[in-house]
Image: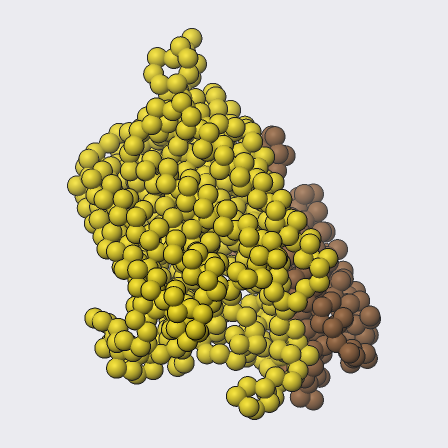
Chain colours: A yellow, B brown
Amino acid sequence: MDNIGIHPGGEHAHVHTDAHGEHHEDLGFWRKYVFSFDHKVIGIQYAVTGLLFLLFGFTLMMVMRWQLAYPGKPIPLIGQWLGQDRAPMGIMLPEFYNQLGAMHGTIMVFLGVVPLAVGGFGNFVMPLQIGAPDMAFPKLNMMSYWVYFCGGVTMLASFFQRGGAAQSGWTSYPPLAVISPGQTMWLIGMIFLITSSLLGSVNFIVTIVQLRAKGLSYMRLPFFVWAQFVTSFLLLLAFPPLEAAGILQLMDRVAGTSFFMPSGLVVSGKPMLIAGDGNPLLWQHLFWFLAHPEVYVLILPAMGIVSEILANNTRKPLWGYKALVYSVVFLGFMSFIVWAHHMFMTGMGTTMSAFFQTTTMIISIPSVVILTALLLSLWGASIRFTTPMLFALAFLPMFGIGGLTGLPLGLAPSDIHLHDTYYVIGHFHYVVAPGTIFALFAGVYYWFPKATGRKMNELMGKIHFWGSFICINGVFMPMFIQGLGGMNRRMYDGGAQYVHNAGLLKYNIAIGFAAWGLGLFQIPFIVNFFSSIKWGALVDRNPWEATTLEWSAPSPPGHGNFLTEPIVYRGPYEYSVPGAARDFTPQFEPEKA
Amino acid sequence: MNIPYTVEERPDTGLANGKLGIWLFLASEVMLFGALFSTYIILRVGSPEWPHGELNVWLGAINTVILISSSVTMVMAWASLKMNDWGKHRLYLIATFVLAGVFLVNKYFEYADHLGKGEGPWHSTFLAIYFTLTGLHGLHIVGGMVVMAYFIGPGAKLWRKNPEQFANRIEYTGLYWHFVDLVWIFLFPVLYLL
C-alpha cells in the first residue's frame, strides 16, 4: 500500500480488522475524513485549519504594513477590490485599518496559534506519546473541532457585516467596543471558541490522567505532555471569566444593559441614552484574567515541542527534567495572579501595583529556568542540524529576547513610558512569532513523517527557515526602537501625525519590506507541505531515531494507534546511554535479558 | 477500539473517565459563575444605591425548596439504580425533571412580571445582573433537563446493554445537577435577600 494522502490507515489502510481484532465496517468518506472521532484526523483538521487562519491573519498584517509604510497611498494589487467602505480608491480608511488590527490579533491568537498548538499538536501527538488508543472522549473531541470551526466562520463572516468587522482591538475594551460596529459577531465568535477550548481541555486532562500506558508514570512523561497538561488547566480555568465577560458585553450591545458603560458618556457631542452606572475597568479585569494565562497557553506547547526536538537532535537527555516539570507547574499557578500588569496605567493604587509587579517578577523565574534548562541541554551535544532542529534552536534566543523585553513592561515605572507603544508589540511578537510560531513550524517538520509516512523536503525547509528567521527579526527588532522613541500602537498612519515620531517613520518602510519578504518565504513551506504528502521520501516508524512512544506506532498510525499494547520501561530521553548498542534507547523497548 | 476506564475505574486514580471529566467541567463552571458573582460585587460596591424589594422573595424561596428537592430526587434516581430498582429510578428521574420544569415556570412568572412593567435588564444595574445571573442559571437548568430527557427517553436503552455505564452517567448528571442547585443556593440570598 502506498501512502498517498493522510488517512487513518497507515499499514492497515484497507483492512477491516484493527489491532484488537475488532471488526468495524468501512465508515465512508464523511465519517472517516470529515466527522471522524479519531484524534489523529481531528488533530490534522485542527492543524490545517489553524495554519490557514495563520496565513489569513498574516495577510491582514501585510496589508496593514502597506498603510504604515506608505500612509494614504492606494494599496497595490487588492486595493481596487476592497470596496468603498474599506478603501475608497484603494486608500485604506482608518476604520478598516482598525478592523485589520483587531482581527489580525484575534485570528492569530484564537483561530491560529492555539488551535494549531493545542488542538493540532496536542490532539495528534499527546495520545500517541502516552500510549493511548485515542482521547478519553472521542466524540467530544470531534465536537470541539466543529465548534471551533463555527467560531472561525463567524469571525470571518464578521468582515461582511455593515460597518465591518470588530475594530476595537483584540482586547475589545468598552466603552469603545460597545458602541463600535462588528463587535456582536466577534463576541458570538468568541463564545464558540471558548466553548470549544473548554470541551477540549477537559478531554486533554482526563486523557493524560487516565489513559497513560503501563509503566508511564508522571515523571516519565515527555515534557511535551506536561506542557499540554498545564496548558489544559489554564484553558479550563481561565477562559470562563472571559466567556462571562463576553456575555455581559453582548448584553450591553444587544439588551441595553450597562455592565461596562459608565454614566455620563458623551459620543460625538451627544449624550448616550444608556442605563449607565457600569464599570469599564470591570471588562479589563475579566478580559485580562483570561488573557494573561492565555499567553502561557501560547508559549507552553511551543516549549514542549522544542523540548522534544532538542532532546532528539542533541542525542542527549534534556537537562533538568525535574526542574522543567516543577517550573511549568509553578508557572501555571502563577499565571493566574499577574493579570493586572496589563493595567498599570488604569489608575490603580501603589499597593495593587506593587502586588502585581512582584508576582510578575516571580513568574519570570520559572520561565528563565525552562529556557536555561533547554539551553544547557545543548552543552556537549552532538547536534543534528535538521530543519526542525534549526527552528527549535532559533526559538531559544528569540524567546529570550521576547522574555527579557517583557521585564520593563512588568515593572510599573518603566511601563509608564512603554505601555501602548510599539515596544509592547515588539515584545509580545518576539515571544509568539519567532517564538511560538517557529516552534510550531519545527513541530510540523518533526511530526509530519508520523502523520503521513513521508518526510518533508530538507532544502525547501532550510530556505523557509533562513528566510523567515532573517525577515522576522527585520520586522520586530525595529519596533523596540520605535517604542522607546514613543511611537504609539494602533495608529492607522503609523504615527505620522505626531511630531515626536518623525525620526521613527523610516523604520515602517523597512519593517514593511521585511514583512512582505517574510510572506514570500512561507511559499517554500506551503509548497513543501503539500507536495511532500504525495512525493516526500517514504519513512518507517522512527525516522528520527527518537525515544518517545509515538515513534513505536506505524507511520501513520491506524485506528487505535498501536499494534501491540505499549509498555514503558524507562524515562523519555534515554539518548547516548553509556554501554548501549545504539545512541538512543526508546521508552518502549524492553530491557535486554 | 475500546477506550480503557470508560466504565471501570483506573486503579491508581480510583476514577472512571467520565467522573474526572464532569468534576473538571464543574471546576470551569465555578469560574464562570464566579466571574459573574464578582461582577455583581464590583457593580454593587461601586453603585451609590442598590434596589431592595424588587424581587418576589416568596417565589424565590419556593424555587429554592423546589431545587433542593430536585437534588434529593436526583440522588434517589441514582441510588435506585445502584439498588437495581429500575422502576424507582424512572420515578425519581422523572420527578427531578418535573421539579426542574416547575422551577422554570416560576422563573417565567417572575420574568414576565418585570418585563410586563418594562423593567428589563436595561432598566437598572441590579436588574441587569439579576437577569444575567438567573438567565445563565436558567440555561443551565434547561441543559440539565435536556440531558435528563435523554436518559428518560432514548438513552434508557443503555441500562440493558451496560448497566454500570448507565448508572455512572446518571451519577455524573447528578453531580452536574447538584452544582446547578448549589449556584442557586448562592443566587437566592445574594439577589433576593441581601
In the picture, measured across the screen, residue A168 lies left or right of residue A551, that is: right
Query: Does residue A138 appear in the picture of this structure?
Result: no
Task: Give the residue drawn at x 60%, y 30%.
Answer: B11
Q: Position of residue A378 (x, y in %)?
A: 41, 29
Image position of A332 with respect to A275: above or below: above
Residue A323 placement: quadrant = top right
Image position of B94 with respect to A495: above or below: above
Specify the quadrant that holds the C terminus of chain A. top left
In the picture, measured across the screen, residue A197 lies left or right of residue B88, that is: left
Q: Which residue is situated farthest in the top direction here?
A: A593
Q: Which residue is situated farthest in the bottom direction here?
A: A270
| Near-viewer residue (A493 or A589) | A493
In the picture, measured across the screen, residue A416 lies left or right of residue A465, that is: right
Task: Give the residue drawn at x 47%, y 20%.
Answer: A569
Q: Position of residue A187 (x, y in %)?
A: 50, 69
Task: Give the residue drawn at x 60%, y 82%.
Answer: A256
Task: Give the residue drawn at x 58%, y 40%.
Answer: A365
Residue A533 placement: quadrant = top left
Image position of A503 with respect to B75: above or below: below
Q: Position of residue B42 (x, y in %)?
A: 71, 68
In the picture, measured across the screen, residue A551 lies left or right of residue A215, that is: left
Query: Does residue A176 appear in the picture of this structure?
Result: yes
| Near-viewer residue (A240 or B187) | A240
| Near-viewer residue (A458 or A589) | A458
Q: Position of residue A191 (x, y in %)?
A: 51, 64
